[in-house]
């Protein structure tokens, strides 16, 4: 029972909450840099934010050039626009990529770092105020203090963090996900699922992070396969809520081996983040059963399924798996063994075990 709990983001949830609760933006500043990709102009989220800011008499400059798996260069471009526009707060709209880019912009705008020092850690708890509007149900980044950026120095993806990276406010409205492509819906749902599961498999799990994870799994697991077809408004709202709960989980526990391994698949093969986790999760859970990890039975109880049932669900979501060369997967195991997330796993897999997971997950036609 020795733990602390910190999650300072105000969550506003419900249909049309961005415009209905426009007053939430007012204390953040006078001029917003809206950090986003291209889809927010089509799904209504950008219009709603501009309407809300307009109601408060706040100015806005749009930076809509965030790319999936944001890079340092993308973050630098956002900071340059922020400075030239004279913006004093940030509104992030989109999936994890715009939300993470926004957190890095908000932090690096007030704490200068050279590119080489960005991943060195030790950030002071200072950042520009942020509001986040997730438009995928996956990362939970709207309630975490992490920004994950492409790290070309180490050829991986690396998180930067500080308590000030928690957004001041997050608006959750599933209506923006109505036209989310099926592949994105499936992949992001696997990311959220992985967060809840890994949170419970973390050395840093607490009674409260476990409570959040169990509730997330309870809602999310029965909806996983539905993401492969048409979902209803209510189902999308639930997916977004469960993704947020999973984000709140990892805000306490961090992610573990699955994310640590998945970054290799994304960095070297462009495998979507959620799919990379989905590919590796089943075999990781089988290893947990072999090692008698106590949290496994709780995870399965929250899902209401057996281990093989969970693996079959993941198989259905994944379809045909990637088939990567054995030598490359051995190299990924070597790299992953040095990843800081691996060390947070309740059972820390050895390099040999990581290799086994990679081979069983992504070397399917041998
Ligand atoms: P994403 O890279 O943000 O978005 C994937 C694609 O979906 C993009 O093409 C995006 O288009 C599109 N899209 C987003 N919302 C849409 C909508 N409502 N309708 C139609 N298209 C939409 O993917 P993501 O899976 O949400 O985020 C992945 C990133 O988050 C990774 O970099 C991962 O490392 C990071 N992550 C962060 C945390 C954290 O705690 N900070 C946790 C897990 C993962 P546009 O972008 O052009 O709009
Ligand atoms: Fe993730």
Image (cartoon, helix red, strand yellow):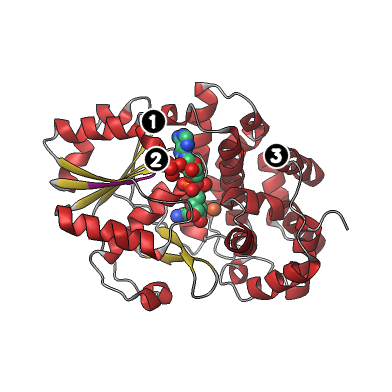
Task: Name the spot of residue 217 as percent of width and height, x first.
Answer: 61, 41
Q: Return the residue nearer the eye: 293 or 14.
A: 14
Q: Tell me the crowding category of disc 1: few under 14, some 14 to 19, or many 20 or more residues within 10 angstroms, Cα based.
A: few
Q: Mark 1 points at which residue?
A: 42
Q: Residue 317 carries which label?
A: 3
At x 29% / y 71%, what residue is drawn?
Answer: 124
Q: In this view, does 223 lie above or below 254?
A: above
Q: Give the range drawn in magenta.
A: 33-37
Furthest residue to the right?
366
For marks 2 and 3, the one nearer the N-term is 2
Taking depth in this image into account, of 335 and 79 the one nearest to the observer is 79
Pinpoint residue 78: horizontal percent, then vertical percent. 29, 56
Note whether ligand 1 is within 8 Å of mark 2.
yes
Q: Is the Cβ of the residue at disc 2 closer than 8 Å to that at disc 1? A: yes
In the drawing, does residue 141 fall left or right of residue 22? right
Distance from mark 3 CB to nearest ligand 1 atom below 8 Å:
no
Give the position of the C terminus as an image quadrant. bottom right
**Gap in angstroms between the C-alphas marked 2 and 1:** 8 Å
Residue 136 is left or right of residue 173, and the answer is right
Judged from the image, the secondary structure of the residue bearing numbered disc 3 is helix
Mark 1 or 3: the one toward you: 1
- Report how far apart the C-alphas of labels 2 and 3 lie in the structure: 26 Å
SS type, badge 2: loop
Rendered position, 156 above or below 262:
below
Q: Residue at x 76, y 44 (%)?
A: 320
Residue 293 on image: x %, y %: 73, 60
Mark in front: 2 vs 3? 2
Mark 2, residue position:
38
Q: Which residue is drawn at 78% across and 41% down?
A: 312
On whether ligand 1 comes within 8 Å of the CB at mark 1, the answer is: yes
């Amino acid at each position: 029972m020795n733990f602390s709990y910190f999650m300072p983001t105000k969550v506003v949830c419900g249909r049309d909450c961005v415009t209905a609760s426009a007053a939430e933006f007012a204390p953040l500043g006078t001029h917003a840099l809206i950090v986003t990709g291209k889809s927010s102009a089509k799904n209504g989220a950008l219009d709603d934010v501009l309407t809300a800011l307009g109601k408060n008499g706040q100015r806005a400059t749009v930076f809509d050039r965030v790319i999936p798996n944001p890079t340092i260069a993308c973050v630098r471009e956002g900071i340059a626009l922020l400075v030239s526009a004279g913006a004093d707060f940030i509104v992030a709209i989109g999936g994890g990529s715009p939300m993470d880019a926004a957190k890095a912009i908000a932090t690096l705008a007030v704490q200068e770092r050279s590119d080489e020092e960005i991943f060195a850690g030790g950030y002071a708890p200072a950042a520009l105020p942020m509001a986040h509007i997730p438009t995928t149900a996956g990362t939970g980044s709207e309630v975490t203090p992490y920004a994950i950026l492409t790290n070309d120095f180490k050829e991986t993806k690396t998180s930067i963090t500080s308590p000030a990276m928690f957004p001041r406010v997050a608006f959750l409205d599933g209506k923006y996900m109505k036209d989310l492509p099926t592949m994105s819906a499936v992949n992001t749902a696997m990311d959220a699922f992985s967060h809840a599961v890994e949170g419970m498999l973390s050395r840093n799990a607490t009674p409260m992070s476990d409570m959040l994870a169990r509730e997330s799994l309870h809602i999310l697991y029965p909806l996983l396969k539905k993401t492969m077809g048409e979902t209803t408004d209510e189902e999308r709202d639930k997916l977004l809520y469960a993704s947020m709960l999973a984000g709140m989980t990892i805000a306490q526990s961090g992610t573990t081996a699955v994310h640590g391994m998945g970054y290799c698949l994304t960095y070297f093969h462009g495998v979507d983040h959620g799919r990379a986790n989905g590919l590796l999760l089943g075999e990781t859970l089988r290893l947990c059963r072999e090692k008698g990890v106590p949290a496994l039975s709780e995870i399965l109880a929250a899902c209401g399924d057996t281990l093989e049932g969970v693996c079959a669900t993941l198989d259905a979501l994944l379809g045909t798996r990637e088939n990567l060369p054995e030598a490359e997967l051995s190299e990924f195991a070597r790299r992953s063994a040095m990843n800081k997330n691996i060390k947070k796993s309740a059972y820390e897999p050895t390099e040999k075990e990581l290799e086994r997971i990679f081979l069983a997950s992504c070397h399917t036609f041998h």
